[in-house]
Amino acid sequence: MASFELFVSALLDLSSACDLGPKVDDLIRGQVVTKTSSNLLRERLLLEGSTLTLECALAFARSVEEPAWHSQDVSSITASANVGNVEKRPES
């Protein structure tokens, strides 16, 4: 499960102990917008304005997180694939 989904899942669990009624999705959506560390995602969510739903916010979050993970994977593969200099052995 993606870190963003874990965050939302934790908020949903916490909210179940409260009597937030039908506003729970709106309140969690607000937390998603304000607490994300991704400026790109925040801008995208804010562009949606009042039409933004929690499900839509999660879909946007997935679309931002997945490429970031793949980029990190490629970076780590590239970093581990670097080989040191090969020097010719002196002839005896």
Image (cartoon, grey):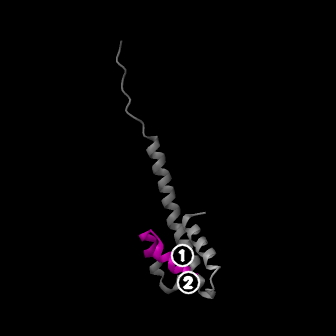
Where's residue 34, x and y in %?
Answer: 46, 76
Magenta residues, as a range? 25-44
> Which label is found at residue 28?
none
Q: Nearer the viewer, mark 2 or mark 1?
A: 2
Q: Residue furthest right?
A: 16
Residue occupying the point 34% across, 18% down: 90
**Vertical side of 77 occupied by 24: above or below:** below
**Amino acid type of the residue tagged 2 in the rendering:** Asp
Quarter of the C terminus within the rendering: top left
Label 1 residue SS: helix
Where's residue 14, x and y in %?
Answer: 61, 76
Q: Which residue is mark 2?
A: 26
**Vertical side of 22 occupied by 74: above or below:** above
Q: Which residue is mark 1?
A: 57
Per the model, the C-alpha gap separating discs 2 and 1 is 11 Å
Mark 2 nearby-residue class (10 Å; few <14, some 14–19, many ≥20): some
Residue occupying the point 56% across, 69% down: 7
Is residue 69 within the magenta segment? no
Is residue 40 within the magenta segment? yes
> Relative to residue 13, is residue 66 drawn left or right?
left
Q: Name the foreground residue: 19 vs 58.
A: 19
Q: Residue furthest front?
A: 17
Label 2 residue SS: helix
**Vertical side of 19 occupied by 39: above or below:** above
Q: Residue furthest top?
A: 92
Q: Earlier in the sequence, mark 2 or mark 1?
A: 2
**Vertical side of 37 occupied by 89: above or below:** above
Quarter of the N terminus within the rendering: bottom right
Where's residue 85, x and y in %?
Answer: 37, 32
Q: Could you tell me what secondary structure mostly forms the magenta stretch?
A: helix
**Amino acid type of the residue tagged 1 in the rendering:** Ala
Mark 1 nearby-residue class (10 Å; few <14, some 14–19, many ≥20): many
